[in-house]
């Protein structure tokens, strides 16, 4: 199992020193990867409930750096760590510009990018981005089509329902060939089918283990129906707990619990990769690095 950690790019830790020092320390500790998420705004009167807890978006999400800029900053401070997004809300971005930014990150990091894409959950963000909420799934499919063309072909041309690219050369290409790994999030039937049909893996989150394993088996079963080898798909799981000093009821894990409870859950989840997001718990860089070291020790011991 590969083990990653969320890059400090939202909440209390968003300074340049937070990014560089945590990145360097995580690499020195032996972590495998750094991850960012994507949040555009924090509405005063949100259109949708946050998909967790009591439905209220955590206050830590009021401050949010751009995920790809933060990863590029981290890339300059490291040499080995993989750099991933979980998830980047792809429909907000014009696909040619998105491809250029992702390619730039892959080139500058010498081929360390993991492209994690999703749809988000807050329609207010689509409104602010000037993108329709209603066709977001179909929009993501077309974006994936275009990314494949841009990264794979010498000459790119596209005429789709939402985007048009005249016959062009778009360079450079990513270091990773034929393209960086594409991981997709989501839990609905269409989202899981999209993972099975065209992704390199699934971006999961913390949820009851029987439900998690059931969704993963569904993805692998559908992948086989599409003529793909299920064993080539990866599950990458994000955990963003509020850590407690004392053990909690197991039903609350992994949303809440001691670090030991969270690590035990992560081991039992059997993901190919797990990364922990400590933003809901830590307020200082030293606190984050202390917990990060303890978590890695627990995972290795397990």
Image: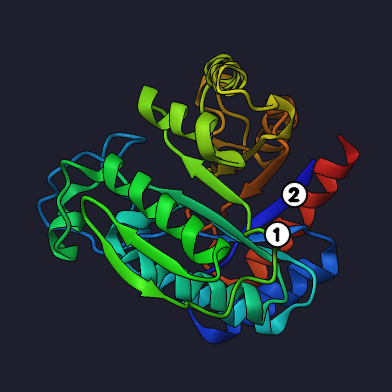
Residue 273 lies in quadrant: top right
Quote the CA–CA distance across marks 1 and 2. 7 Å
**Residue 113, placed above or below residue 183:** below
Element carrying mark 2: strand
* Viewer-proximal residue among 221 and 238: 221
Question: Residue 51: horizontal and vertical position, in percent?
Answer: 32, 36
* Viewer-proximal residue among 231 and 188: 231
**Residue 15, placed above or below residue 256:** below
Residue 131 lies in quadrant: bottom left
Residue at 37% of width from left, 54% of height from top? 143
Residue under label 2, please give it: 3
Q: Can residue 224 be seen in this view?
A: yes
* Viewer-proximal residue among 234 and 54: 234
Residue at 14% of width from left, 63% of height from top? 130
Left or right: 294 in relation to 209: right
Element carrying mark 1: strand
Left or right: 141 in relation to 12: left
Label 1: few (<14), some (14–19) or many (≥20) C-alpha neighbours in 10 Å? many
Question: Residue 19: horizontal and vertical position, in percent?
Answer: 59, 77
Question: Residue 246: horizontal and vertical position, in percent?
Answer: 62, 35
Residue under label 1, please give it: 33
> Could you tell me if the residues under marks 1 and 2 are in contact, i.e. CB atoms within 8 Å?
yes
Residue at 68% of width from left, 25% of height from top? 230
* Viewer-proximal residue among 190 and 296: 190
Residue 54 lies in quadrant: top left
């Amino acid at each position: 199992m590969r083990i990653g950690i969320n890059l400090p790019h939202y909440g209390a830790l968003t300074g340049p020193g937070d990014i560089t020092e945590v990145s360097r320390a995580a690499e020195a500790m032996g972590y495998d990867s750094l991850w960012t998420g994507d949040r555009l705004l924090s509405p005063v009167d949100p259109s949708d409930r946050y998909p967790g807890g009591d439905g209220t978006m955590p206050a830590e999400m009021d401050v949010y750096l751009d995920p790809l800029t933060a990863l590029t900053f981290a890339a300059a401070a490291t040499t080995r760590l993989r750099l991933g997004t979980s998830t980047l809300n792809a429909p907000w971005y014009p696909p040619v510009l998105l491809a250029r930014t992702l390619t730039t990150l892959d080139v500058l990091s010498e081929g360390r990018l993991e492209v994690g894409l999703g749809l988000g959950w807050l329609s207010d963000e689509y409104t602010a981005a000037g993108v329709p909420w209603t066709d977001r799934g179909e929009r993501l499919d077309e974006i994936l089509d275009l990314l494949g063309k841009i990264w794979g072909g010498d000459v790119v041309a596209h005429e789709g329902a939402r985007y048009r690219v005249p016959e062009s050369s778009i360079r450079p290409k990513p270091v990773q060939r034929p393209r960086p790994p594409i991981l997709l999030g989501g839990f609905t039937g269409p989202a899981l089918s999209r993972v099975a049909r065209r992704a390199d893996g699934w971006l999961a989150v913390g949820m009851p283990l029987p439900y998690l394993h059931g969704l993963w088996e569904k993805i692998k079963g559908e992948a086989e129906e599409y003529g793909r080898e299920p064993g080539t798909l990866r599950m990458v799981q994000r955990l963003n707990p509020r850590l407690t000093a004392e053990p909690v009821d197991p039903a609350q894990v992994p949303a809440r619990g001691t670090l030991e409870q969270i690590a035990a859950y992560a081991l039992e989840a059997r993901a190919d990769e797990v990364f922990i997001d400590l933003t809901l718990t830590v307020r200082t860089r030293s606190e984050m690095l202390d917990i990060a070291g303890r978590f890695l020790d627990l995972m290795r011991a397990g």
